Image: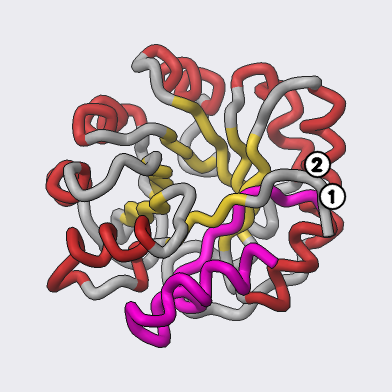
Amino acid sequence: MSARLIRIAPSILSADFSKLGEEVRMIDAAGADYIHIDVMDGHFVPNLTFGAPVVKSIRRHTDKPFDVHLMIAPVDALVADFVAAGADIITAHAEAGPHLHRTLQLIKSHGVKCGVSLNPATPAESIAHVMDMLDLVLVMTVNPGFGGQSFIPLLDKIATVRRMIDASGRAIDLEVDGGVDPKTAKDCIAAGADVLVAGTAIFKDGPENYASNISAIRG
């Protein structure tokens, strides 16, 4: 086990959308550290979820940080909408547009935390020249677009990002998203992760098990 503070970010992609506010309250009470919000556009990724109005509608149900993962392209035009909706962290994909540095500047200009996400085939080194701007790096361990996929064992990549963060001397979250369950979580933590996104593994057994599922992933 790591001495790092491990935080759990349940992905509401796996929640019951018919009662999303209630689901957010329940995962908050069950021990969530962040609320992970997967925004998909049906273009950058092959699925369509929800936009800023839904994020705004659930903001009043929790004080936990909203960790908004934008799987959309282009990104820049919608950043302000998600800030206004209550995002605390906005993560854009390195692959989503031609000007990552400009996108990160834009996110930071709104006074929220700034993250970058890396798809499985995108090398860690692609963010070497924006480390000074980041509050979070999200390593995808599935191809983005759908919940419930199997974990891709990119532990060497997680370890590489951990070394990059440590070398930067900055307080940057290292988040892992995709196929995270109690078993894979241990491997991710050992490789250097300190924020774990989980959807299916938390929501699958119903609200009475949210707390125990979060605890099992935290380790």
Instruction: State the residue in front, 192 or 134.
Output: 192
In terms of secondary structure, where does tag 1 sit? helix
Q: Is residue 89 left or right of residue 115?
A: left
Instruction: State the residue in front, 67 or 207.
Output: 207
Q: Is residue 108 left or right of residue 120?
A: left
- Residue under label 1, please give it: 159
Q: Is residue 106 above or below residue 67?
A: above
Q: Is residue 10 above or below residue 130?
A: below
For the N terminus, the image quarter is: bottom right
Q: Position of residue 160 (x, y in %)?
A: 84, 45
Q: Position of residue 5 (x, y in %)?
A: 69, 45
User: Residue drawn at (86%, 26%), measured in percent from left and top?
Assistant: 167
Instruction: State the residue in front, 178 or 217.
Output: 217
Tag of residue 162: 2
Mark 1: which amino acid? Ala
User: Residue drawn at (50%, 28%), measured in percent from left and top?
Assistant: 114
Q: Position of residue 69 (x, y in %)?
A: 42, 47
Mark 2: which amino acid? Arg
Pointer 2 local density, CA inside 10 Å: few below 14, some 14–19, many at least 20: many
In terms of secondary structure, where does tag 2 sit? helix
Is residue 196 inside the magenta stretch?
yes
Coloration of the structure image: secondary structure
Is residue 216 inside the magenta stretch?
yes
Q: Does the rendering let one see residue 119?
A: no
Mark 2–mark 1 contact, CB under 8 Å? yes
Instruction: State the residue in front, 186 or 46.
Output: 186
For the C terminus, the image quarter is: bottom right
Q: Position of residue 77 (x, y in %)?
A: 27, 29
User: Residue drawn at (69%, 32%), measured in percent from left and top?
Assistant: 127
Q: Quadrant of residue 152?
A: bottom right
Q: Does the rendering let one see residue 67?
A: yes
Specify start and end residues of the magenta stretch as a single range.
192-219
